[in-house]
Amino acid sequence: MDLELRHLKIVRAVAEAGSVTKAATQLGLAQPSLTAQLKRIERTLGGTLFERDRNGARPTPLGELVLTRARVLLPAVRELQEEAVRFANTYAGISGFRIGATHGPILGGLVERLTGAHPSTPISTRTSWSARELTTLVGAGRLDFALIGTCGDTPPPAAEAMAWSVVGTDPVFALLGEDHPLAGEKEVELSSLADEGWAVVPGDGCFADCFAGACARAGFVPKTVYETDVATCLHLVKAGKAVALCQATFDLAAGLVMMPIAGAPLRWRHLLGWHSDSLTACAAPAVADHARDAYADAVRRSSRYADWLVANPQFGTVP
């Protein structure tokens, strides 16, 4: 295995945290995964980098040597990256907007507004199920902005020099077929869906764990969970084979009913992120305003959600 910059970041994180467990939390990794990576790094470098005991992790002499080099190399590489991004764009100011997004209701409206406000500025988009991937691409200068979602109050993926703005907060609703026995109710208790199969889209956050926790509090374990693409989720719901979880701004298709879940046990935050040192950071406040306007339009399109918000004003658009 060749030594990579991410390996040096791991060594630095463990040294600064003084503990593999704390470093894993800061890096957004599972502790066993970080321990395994650290062992591979130590094999590559030919020796132990940390003495580990119940009091934490302390660098060995070899670890101190590696840290000394890492503290020079990592800032130098970051500076090189920033200078390269500035050089590539300085000749024409902001030469374009490169936006990455996970699945959600905002991207289309944001592109519509940006093209209207800046008709001569190129705009490109990229989609991914992974919020972590998009955040990494922004940090690497390959995207200017990332539109992602996080479950509840969970922070966005950890990354250096990222700035985040909350666009809006939705409850998670249940999506039922129009022939479902509960389709005519005003809202449903989560426990009333205990015997259903569930269709969900993939992601790399904690939503699956939060959903399992909400079900446990409601007194059941989900019988079947289908993790698949949006089209398949909708097919299964229409066929009566599953109930889907969806953002309250979901654009309903024929044959479907969106149902609030009593007590809103699950929430979803929409976030816009950018690299605070990038050239396009100066445009971030305006882009965030456009994103909030696009989100507000999505709320207005969902009459069920707009009505629900009257009694639940803590959700929806952020002032």
Image (cartoon, grey):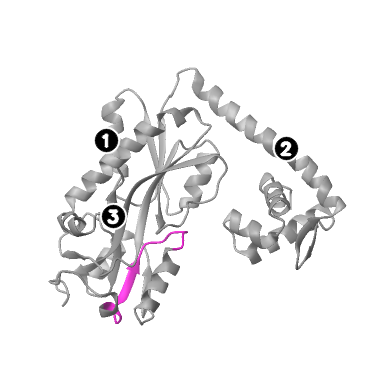
Query: What residue type is disc 2 on?
Result: Leu
Between 261 and 197, the one nearer to me in the picture: 261
Mark 3 = which residue? 314
Query: Of callouts 2 and 1, which one flags the residue occurring earlier in the amino acid sequence?
Result: 2
Query: What residue type is disc 1 on?
Result: Glu
Quadrant of the rendered structure where residue 118 is?
top left
Separation of marks 3 and 2 at Cα, in angstroms? 46 Å
| Magenta-colored stretch includes residue 195 | yes
Vertical comparison of 104 with 126: above or below: below
Question: Residue placed at 39% from the left, 50% from the top?
Answer: 102
Mark 2 = which residue? 73
Mark 1 = which residue? 112
Question: Residue placed at 18% from the left, 56% from the top?
Answer: 310
What is the secondary structure assignment of the residue under circle 1?
helix
Vertical comparison of 208 with 161: above or below: below
For the C terminus, the quadrant is top left
Vertical comparison of 74 with 268: above or below: above
How crowded is the residue under tag 3: few (<14 C-alpha within 10 Å), some, or many (20+)? few
The answer to whether residue 252 shows anywhere in this view is no
The answer to whether residue 269 shows anywhere in this view is yes
Tag in front: 3 or 2: 3
Query: What residue type is disc 3 on?
Result: Gln
Query: Of callouts 3 and 1, which one flags the residue occurring earlier in the amino acid sequence?
Result: 1
Tag in front: 3 or 1: 3
How crowded is the residue under tag 1: few (<14 C-alpha within 10 Å), some, or many (20+)? few
Residue 78: percent from the left, percent from the top?
63, 35
Residue 18: percent from the left, percent from the top?
72, 56
Give, as a single range, the part of the protein colored magenta: 193-206
